[in-house]
Amino acid sequence: MSIESTKSTHDMEKIREMLLSGDTKQKNKAYRMLCMEKFENNKELFTERVEPAIEKYRKGDCTMKLTDQNGTPLSGKRIRIQQKTHDFKYGANIFLLDEFKTEEENKIFRDTFHQYFNLATVPFYWAELEPEQGKLRFAADSPKIYRRPAPDLCVDYCNEYGVLPKLHCLFYDKFIPSWLPKRDEKAMKELYEKRFSQIAERYSGKMYEFEVTNELLDEGNWGDACSVLCEKRDTPLWAYQLARKYFPGDTLVINESNRVPEIAEQDYRSPYFMFIEGLLLKGAFIDKIGIQNHIFCGARGPQETEIFKVLQYFNPVKVLDGLGYLAEFGKPLEITEVTIPTFGEDEEAEELQADILRHLYRLWFSIPGMESVVYWNTVDGMAYVEPNGISSENRVRGGLFHRELTPKKAALALKELFEKEWHTDLELVTDENGKVDFRGFYGDYILQAEGVNYSFGIHKDGAIENIIELER
C-alpha cells in the first residue's frame, strides 16, 4: 500500500482566507487544493495498486475460435469484438421517473437514465407505499407522491431498457406510515411481516437485490419517527430472518450510512464492522454488504467551512483501508448511495466534481469484492425535501445533471469510464488455428465476422474458449 501523506503541503490559514475571500477563482483553487491533495500525494497508489487490480479483477481472458461447418479452422479472418454490457453495476436512484411537471422533461429523463446507468434503486419507503392502511401503491397508475414513483412503474421501465431494479428497502423504521401502532411491538411485527409478504408476492425473483435494513446505526437520531422495534436488541436479526423467510432465493443486502473513514480509523472495533459480525455470528442472512458515500458538504452550513469536516472522504488510503476491513467478511460489497458535491456553479467547480468522481470510482472499481456503485440524486435541485420544507441535500449541488437535465461534467466522466476507459472494442485477425486471444472487461459481447453478429460473454468463472461456426 502507498504511504499516506500525513503533512499537508498547503497552508491551511491561507486556504481559509481564499475560501472566504469572495473571489470565485480563489475559492475554486482552494477547493481543488483541499479535495485533490490526498489523491495527488498518493499517485503511486493508483499506478501500483489500483490500475493493476482493475486489470486483474475486472477483466478475463477469452479465446474465440472460428470454424466452417465441417469444423475446419478459418484463419486470416478479420473480426471485431464489441462489448455491449458490463457485469459491474453502476446505477442511481430512479426516484424522478415521471416526476417532472412537463411531459418533455419526463421524456428526457426516461431517454437519459438508461444511457448512463445499468442499475436503478427503486423506492419502497413504507410511508409512501402505503399512506393509507390497505391501499398499496404498487401499480404503475397509483396516485403520485413526489420522488416516490410506484414500484411497478419503475420495474416496467427497467425491464424495457435493460436496467436492473433493486429494492430500497424492506425495514427502514424512520419513514413509516402515521397509522401504524408504533408503541405496540407485537402489532408492529405482525404488520411488518405482512409488508414483507406482500412485497415478496409481487417482486420476489424480479429484483437484482433487496435491501433489508437501512441506517440502523443512525436510529438514535430518528426520535419519534421510529417505532418500538428500534429499541429492541433482536430487531436487526429478526428483520433478516423474516426477509429470508419471504425472499428465500433473493440477494439480501445490509445498507448503512457513511462509515468508511470511521472503519479505516477504528478497524475491527468500528460500530459497523462489529454490527455485521454480530449479526452473522447469530445467523443473520446477509448476502451483500452495502455502505453509503454521501459527501453532504454544504448541507447544514456554508461549504467554505464544512469542507474541512469531509476531507477524509477524499483520502484514497482511508477508502481502500475501510472497505478492506468490510471485504474480510467474504461478502460482495456495494457503495449504495453516492453524493459528490459541486463547490460552486461554474465550469471549474463542475470539473472538480468530475475529477473527484473519477478518482473515487477507480478506487471502488479496483476492489475485488465490489459488485456495484449507486449514485444518489441525479438532478440538481430535485433532492429530498425535509418536512420543514428545506432541502439540505439540494444545497450540496450533488447531482450529475443540471436542473434542465443536461449532463454535468461528472455525468460525462462516469459515462466515459464505463464506455471508454473500462470498455473493450477490438479489431483482430484469426491465426492459423482460426483463433484470436484477448482480454476484456467482464460483460456481454458481440463478435462481427463477415457481416454477421455472434453473441458471447466474458464472465468471471465463465468459459474461456468460445467456438463460432461460420457458413462458407
Image (cartoon, rainbow, N blue to C red):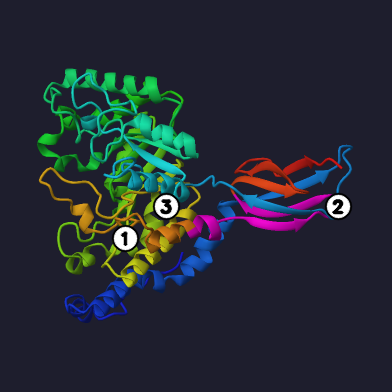
Labelled pair 2, 1 in contact (Cβ < 8 Å): no
Badge number at residue 75:
2
Q: Is residue 275 left or right of residue 466?
A: left
Q: Nearer the viewer, residue 453 or 49?
A: 453
> Distance between the Cα atoms at labels 3 and 2?
46 Å
- Badge 1 marks a residue whose secondary structure is helix
Q: Which of labels 1 and 3 is toward the front?
A: 1
Residue at the image point whose x is 25% and y is 62% from the top: 310
Range drawn in magenta? 416-441
Which amino acid lies under the numbered mark 1 shown in the image of this protein?
Tyr
| Drawn side of residue 232 relative to residue 64, left or right | left
Give the quarter of the image for residue 398.
Answer: bottom left
Q: Which residue is mark 1?
A: 313
Element on which disc 3 rests: helix
Q: Secondary structure at mark 2?
A: loop
Name the residue rendered at 83%, 55% in the picture.
431
Query: Would residue 352 be found to the left or right of residue 68 on screen?
Result: left
- What is the distance, in whole Å, between disc 2 and disc 1 at their CAs? 52 Å
The residue identified by callout 3 is 324
Question: Label 3 is placed on what type of residue?
Answer: Gly
